[in-house]
Amino acid sequence: MKRILTIQDISCFGKCSLTVALPLFSAMGIEAVILPTAVLSTHTMFKGFTCKDLSDQLKPITDHWKQEGITFDAICTGYLGTEEEIDTVIDIIKNFRNENTLVFVDPAMGDNGKLYPAFDEHYAKKNASLCAVADIIDPNITEASFMTGLPYRENYDEDYVKELLLKLAQFGTKTPILTGVSLSDGKTGAMGYDAGTKTFFNYQNDRIPAAYHGTGDIFSSVLAGAFVLGIERTKALKIAADYTALTISETEKNPDKPWYGVDFEATIPALVDVLRELC
Ligand code: PXL
């Protein structure tokens, strides 16, 4: 069984970061090891959230794993807290990676042209150094524009997306993947760049006109899981994008309209079915 280490916060209420990564990896038949970077009462889209930083625990926890000889097929990172924490996470990646370890970084820090409340532009630039040690990164257009310094655009064409991807590849990442890329009306998906073969790849599906929090974390977890399972990259993009879209449409049926997170629990059986056919 493949084993993933996932490094991100745990928001007790709100269905994002570790509370989606952990069940999704388990459902995908992957052993999930968690390294919580902070405990929050809710994610930061709620007012008055509490936050207990766990940065000082990261080294002792991972030192213990080293002593125990624990290894990982993949290391994934998501929402982190501070620039110092990014440095610690880079050290952890260097310490645990071998030639077969897949390093997947989701530089989760913003959306819709804005950074999340806890972050500033300096933090955004610091994320570029984390992306530099990754095999795969999957920022959205907001995160990519803050990291590269290219202007954020709401209306764009394929050339803009390719320019962002080429800039991201300059950080040193082998495979940058941009999420939330819409290349025609009514469609949305993701486009990636393989710096080794200098080729672009892309998957688009129907856009569901609804916005919920946490969909980026769901897409990332399923995408990272699919890569770890050895699924070919365009198929991996399709699995992650289709699962996210299915989950959004399922959530649309919920009369409570839970803006804070999607009903991914209801669509886990469909994800398992897709993977059962492939693996
Ligand atoms: O979904 C990304 C995310 C993860 N963790 C925390 C967040 C957010 C987005 O707002 O606040 C704590």
Image (cartoon, grey):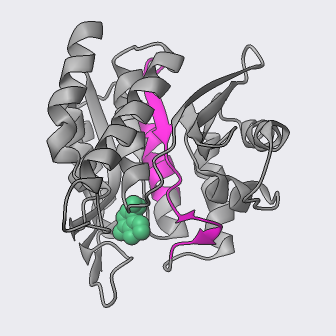
Query: Would you place residue 242 above or below residue 196 in this image?
Result: below
Can residue 279 be seen at all in this image of the molecule? no
Q: How many marks?
A: 0
User: Of 170 and 272, which appears nearest the observer?
Assistant: 272
User: Of 81 and 222, which appears nearest the observer?
Assistant: 222
Query: Would you place residue 196 above or below residue 33 in this image?
Result: above
Quadrant of the rendered image containing residue 150: bottom right
What is the quadrant of the N terminus in the image?
top left
Give x and y (percent) for residue 92.
42, 46
Left or right, residue 192 beside residue 164: left
Give x and y (percent) for residue 266.
15, 43
What is the quadrant of the C terminus in the image?
top left
Picture quarter with ligand 1: bottom left
User: Of 91 and 245, which appears nearest the observer?
Assistant: 245
Outermost residue on the bottom side: it is: 48
Can residue 196 be seen at all in this image of the molecule? yes
- For the record, the magenta segment spans 87-116
Quadrant of the rendered image containing residue 184: top right
Query: Would you place residue 39 above or below residue 218 in this image?
Result: below
Left or right, residue 177 beside residue 196: left
Residue at screen point 51% across, 59% down: 86
Give x and y (percent) for residue 12.
18, 68
Quadrant of the rendered image containing residue 24: top left
Residue at screen point 80% across, 43% down: 157
Query: Would you place residue 241 above or below residue 82 in this image?
Result: above
Residue at screen point 32% across, 46% down: 249
Left or right, residue 150 beside residue 13: right
Residue 70 in magenta stretch: no
Left or right, residue 86 beside residue 2: right
Residue at screen point 39% across, 52% down: 215
Give x and y (percent) for residue 177.
60, 36
